Amino acid sequence: GFGVRRIRVTALVGSAAEHFLGSFDGHRVLLRLANQVQHLSPPTAHSTRPGYRIVSWRNRTPDELVHSFSEALNRLLDAPGAELQMPERNWGADEVRSWEQKMTGGSQVLLVCCAVDDSVGEVAAATVVTVDEHDSTHASQHDTVVLPQHRGHGLARWVKEQQASVLAAEFPSLQKIYTTVNAENHPMLTVNRSLGYQTVAERILVEIRRVENASHKPR
């Protein structure tokens, strides 16, 4: 064979692909992922968090926030199962600029909403969304993160709530926001539930070890 020691692949729960992957010896489910959707509703009254202010931008992070925003993106690996979905990172400004270029390829618009700590002028929490300018009826939310020293203040819900208001204002035709959350990430699932997100499907990440020797048992 090709000497492949393992493969990882995602499958929709309840699909033929899930059944097929489950028929291999040595398969194991690494992650369960909830595909969620929020039906965008009219913006709620402006809310505040003492000591923080909301800062939003399109495509390019303001120079004065790029360093602290890179620190926030580094902390995405704190989320349950994140190490299975992304490599270790130690980003700085240069990596953020490269990431921005990647996220804004084609007709994609990158929108970031942050809670900034007023005492030091640094990003405390952030949420990241992309919208296709050619089809702005829906958005894809990629990441939401709160830095460790700022957790427990409701910032994740706040930035997502404020991001929805920004999206409604900038894209009047936008109807839905889609996201994927690890089923073990209970804090984020709780936040999403409070904002009206609903799980519409589930996916699993499956690993099959020693592919060259794995046996497939037809069922």
Image: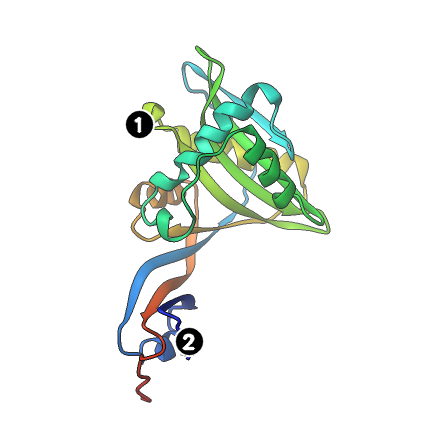
Q: Front-most of 22 and 215? A: 215
Q: Residue at left 67%, top 41%?
A: 171
Residue 32: mark: none
Give the mark nearer the N terminus: 2 vs 1: 2
Which residue corresponds to the image point at 42% horizontal and 14% vertical from the top-left? Answer: 51
Q: Position of residue 16 (x, y in %)?
A: 41, 79
Q: Quadrant of residue 129?
A: top right
Q: Is residue 134 left or right of residue 20?
A: right
Query: Is the C terminus in the top left, top right, bottom left or bottom right quadrant?
Result: bottom left
The residue depicted at 65 percent of the width and 41 percent of the height is 101
Query: Where does label 2 land, which residue?
Result: 17
Three-letter amino acid code at disc 1? Gly
Q: Nearer the viewer, mark 2 or mark 1?
A: 2
Note whether 24 is above or below 186 in the view shown: below
Question: Residue at the spot x=64%, y=51% of the render?
Answer: 137
**Viewer-nearest residue: 192 or 1:** 1
**Quarter-wise, where is residue 50 in the image?**
top left
In front: 8, or 169? 8
Q: Secondary structure at mark 2?
A: helix
Q: Give the class, few, some or many, for how many residues have Cα within 10 Å of label 2's Cα (few <14, many ≥20).
A: some
Horizontal and vertical percent for residue 102? 62, 45
In the image, taking residue 164 as reference, residue 120 lies left or right, namely left
Does dot 1 land on a helix, a strand or a loop? loop
218 vs 110: above or below: below
Viewer-closest of 184 and 218: 218
Q: Which residue is mark 1?
A: 152
**Residue 92 makes an appearance in the image:** yes
Q: Tell me: residue 184, above or below residue 101.
A: below
Q: Label 2 amino acid?
A: Ala
